[in-house]
Amino acid sequence: MRADRLIQILTTLQARGRATASELAEETEVSLRTIYRDIDSLALAGIPVYAEHGAQGGYRLLNGYKVQLNGMSQAETHALFLSGLGSTLSGLGLDAATLSAEKKLAAALPEPMRKHVHHLRKRFHLDVPGWFNEAEQPTFLQAVFDAVCADRQLHMRYRSWQREKNLELAPLGVVLKGGAWYLVGQTDAKPRTYKITRILSLEVLDTTFTPPAEFNLAAYWQENTARLDEETHSKLARVRVSPLGLRILPDLCSSYVRRRIRLLGKADENGWQELELPVGGQWQTISDFLRLGIEVEVLAPQALRDAVRSTVNSLAERYR
């Protein structure tokens, strides 16, 4: 809708300070001609928007002009106030600031919308960690986050899977996934991921750095997790599962594995179904299949079948 687009143009200009017609057209997914008409409409409506020419030119709002929140749609208000980020940001020391910001935003809303927001907040709760897990509260989380915000180098002692090591790196960002906090840092030409609970000691250095202009934290994280899924599920296994096993298998798999389960032929007369699925290391794969108990039989590869048999025999011997 045009009204929504005009509000988007205003909020973009307020947030960035300046934007070209091309940038606004891309942001709002309309033509340049439409942007020119929208800018004229805003000016005619009394909005102090003006154009600057030259290499650093573009559209700006007059200094001091602020967009009022009474232009927000109900859906936008829902998205803003149902984020539930207060408890999530407590580890960064921002829970009080988040609550204060929400109160200020709510106060700027029209009265009917403010009552609606209060009603909705009592009916929505965000619980980030998975079942049977508590959210991590890493010792060095706030120090890491402060260094990220200040573009300051870090020196840390870190415990990886293999060993402990000393690292000096440029902290590029922090990520919260499944209740666990991660640091994305760069020691050489390639960013890497570090779990913050594995940091044994930390020093924020006075040395500052300039983050790579081309680095995008969200894009890096998406690519990194996709690559990790592929690397940790680099093999295929063929199994038979019972009707019960077929029902519960998706709940025991990661989304990566779940999307790649391939049924082989039809179920037999007892409802047992052969299928193929990606698996990782042998120890982890055996542990995963044991969760299905007698509802699964590994058929191939033979080495995995032999390893499962050996593990089951050892368990039987243990419990004699």
Image (tube, rainbow, N blue to C red):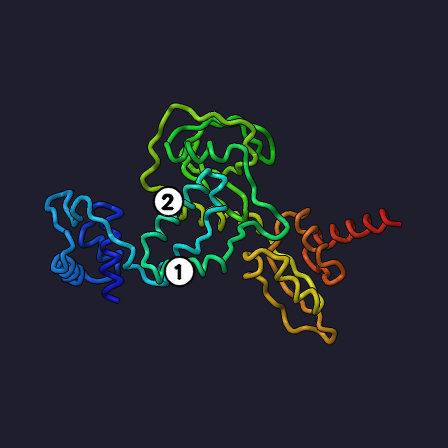
Along the line of sight, which residue is nearer the eye, 264 or 209?
Answer: 209
User: Secondary structure beneath disc 1?
Assistant: helix
| Image quadrant where one finds the N terminus | bottom left
Disc 1 target residue: 115
- Mark 1 to mark 2: distance in Å? 38 Å
Residue 278 tag number: none
172 on left or right of 2? right
User: Secondary structure beneath disc 2?
Assistant: loop
Characterize the local packing of mark 2: few (<14), some (14-19) or many (20 or more) Cα atoms within 10 angstroms. few
Residue 311 drawn at (x, y percent): 77, 49
Let me know if residue 191 appears in the view: yes
Q: How many marks?
A: 2
> In the displayed structure, would residue 157 be above or below residue 307?
above
Q: Nearer the viewer, mark 1 or mark 2?
A: 1
> In the displayed structure, would residue 111 be above or below residue 153?
below
Residue 296 drawn at (x, y percent): 72, 61
Residue 216 tag number: 2
Residue 140 drawn at (x, y percent): 51, 32
Name the residue located 19 percent from the left edge and 62 percent from the top edge.
31
**Mark 1 touching mark 2, by CB under 8 A?**
no
Characterize the local packing of mark 1: few (<14), some (14-19) or many (20 or more) Cα atoms within 10 angstroms. few
1 or 2: tag closer to the N-terminus: 1
Amino acid at pointer 2: Asn
Name the residue located 63 percent from the left edge and 72 percent from the top edge.
265
The quarter of the picture where residue 215 lies is: top left
Name the residue located 22 percent from the left edge and 45 percent from the top edge.
17
* Outermost residue, right side: 320
Let me know if residue 192 appears in the view: no
> In the displayed structure, would residue 140 be above or below residue 4?
above
Along the line of sight, which residue is nearer the eye, 251 or 129?
Answer: 129
> In the displayed structure, would residue 213 be above or below residue 308?
above
62 on left or right of 269? left
